[in-house]
Amino acid sequence: MEPAGIVLISHSAKVAEGIKEIIHQVAKDVPIELAGGTNDGRIGTDVEKIQTAIERAHTDSGVLLIYDLGSAMMNAEVAVEMSEFDDIEIANAPLLEGAYVAAVESGMGKSLAQVKLAAERALQED
Amino acid sequence: MELTAHDIITWMKKTNEKIQSNKEHLTSLDQAVGDGDHGINMARGFKEVVVKLEDTSYESVSDALKDTAMTLMSKVGGAAGPLYGTAFLKLSTSLKGKSADYTHFLNGLEESLAGLKQRGKSQEGEKTLIDVWSPVIEKMKESDDFDASLLKHTAGDSMEKTKDIKATKGRASYLGDRSIGHLDPGSVSSFYVFEALAETIEGGR
């Protein structure tokens, strides 16, 4: 099985790019795709961008979406509902920390459910 | 009375006109409680909707509404895209294969409202566009045919009432009590949607 892919959905293209840079240091083999900003380069999120990123990041282990603010979540949900894949999960996690932990877990070959759980627990101390 | 595909196009054109001429108003309302992009986002989205609808010929109300929904989802950018997109998509799905008579249309609007609540994980009283959609639909249930003046007044009054609500959803919720005293921008754009529907029913242009 390939590692589960990750899609970073942010209102800002720069935020998404910056987070990918950070993650790339620790997880080089995990597909990470970006859906940052709108199609015309403004602050916001875009369903089509998210759909494209999902298609690129998807592997046989599925794909995890992580988002930054409310409307990004709504657009993520719309993209999931429109997608033909049924192995897409949306993590309710902080974008940077969640995606970082998710990428590490995915790189270790964890299942999509485990990767999602790890992302959602990213800020928990244990 | 029964709405035709042509009426849907008229409805969206009128909505677009109102949004274009109130773009600055929507923007300043959103600057007070949100991220300030509602006017620009709605103006761009509805402009594209009109381009799409004028460019296509429609056999059914459902098809025209579906293109409206898909265009809004892909062109709006802010929270309004998925919300209005979902509302019109639910209306479209509900009217598929049916005539848009009052009963069918009202049933469709109820589906839209359910879609808005589900998409926004929101209820009435949280200072969102639901505070216009919900009372309008409740009021429509008391009537058995389209009533333009009822639509306008209910939508207008409901929009005004959002001023007194404290936001608990969306970007405005970060402001807490400071959101009180401001109109909810989404409720104002929803007022334009229903006002445009009322004018379509009145048969203007």
Image: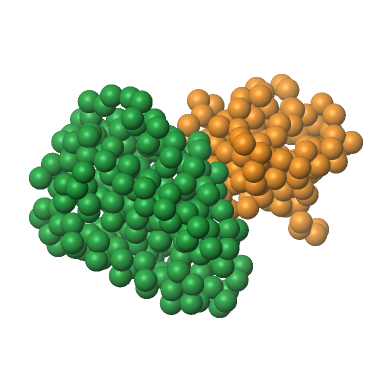
Query: Is B202 positioned to the left or the right of A3 in the image?
Result: left
Q: Is residue A91 above or below residue B166?
A: above
Q: Residue at x 39, y 30 (%)?
A: B52
> Is residue A61 something that shows in the picture?
no
Residue B152 % position (x, y) = 25, 61
Q: Colour of chain B?
A: green
x 40%, y 61%: residue = B188
Q: Position of residue A88 (x, y in %)?
A: 58, 34
- Quadrant where the N terminus of chain B is found in the figure: top left
Judging depth in this view, the residue of B34 and B88 nearest the camera is: B34
Judge from the rendering whether residue B31 lies leftward or rightward of residue B192; answer left or right: right
- Residue A20's place in the image compared with B178, above or below, is above
Measured as percent of width and height from the top left, residue A69 is found at 63, 53
Q: Position of residue A112 (x, y in %)?
A: 66, 35
Residue shown at 56% from the left, 78% from the top: B177
Q: Nearer the viewer, residue A74 or B48?
A: B48
What is the drawing colour of chain A? orange
Residue B90 appears in which quarter of the rendering? top left
At x 35%, y 55%, the residue is: B192
**Relative height, residue B53 to residue B25 (above, below):** above
Colouring scheme applied when the structure was drawn: by chain
Q: Is residue B127 visible?
A: yes
Q: Pick the quarter of the image with the C terminus of chain B.
A: top left
Q: How many marks?
A: 0
